[in-house]
Amino acid sequence: MITNAAEYEKAHGDLRILEQRIADLERDHPIGEKGFTKAGVRKMIAKINEELAVFESREETRLATPR
C-alpha cells in the first residue's frame, strides 16, 4: 500500500518499467507465446494502478477536508 509521496513516485516509476516490459514482450513474442509472463506483468500493472488510485483518492479527500 502506498502511504506517502515518495512511495507514490516510486510506484509511478515501477509502472513505467512494467509498461515497457509488456510492450517489449508483445513486440518480441507473438500472440500465444509467453502468455503466462504477459499475464503476470499485466497483473502487476493492475495492482500498481489500483494502489495509485487508492492513494490519490485518500489525498483528494485529505485536501478537500476543511481543517
Image: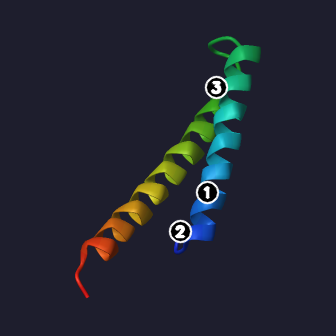
Q: Residues within 10 Å of mark 2 (few under 14, many from 20)?
A: some
Q: Give the label on residue 24, or none.
A: none
- Give how far apart the Cα atoms at labels 2 and 3 are: 29 Å
Q: Which quadrant of the rendered structure holds the C terminus?
A: bottom left
Residue occupying the point 56% across, 69% down: 5
- Left or right: residue 3 versus residue 16 is left
Q: Amino acid at mark 2?
A: Ile
- According to the picture, the residue beneath numbered tag 2 turns out to be 2
Q: Residue at x 33, y 76 (%)?
A: 62
User: In screen coordinates, is 50 left or right of 4?
Assistant: left
Image height of 30 relative to 14, above or below: above
* Residue contact between numbered discs 2 and 1, judged by CB atoms under 8 Å: yes
Q: Earlier in the sequence, mark 2 or mark 1?
A: 2
| Disc number placed over residue 35 in the picture, else none | 3
Is 32 or 26 nearer to us in this picture? 26
Residue at 54% of width from left, 74% of height from top? 4
Residue that label 1 marks: 11
The picture places residue 23, in percent across and down from the top left corner, at 67, 25
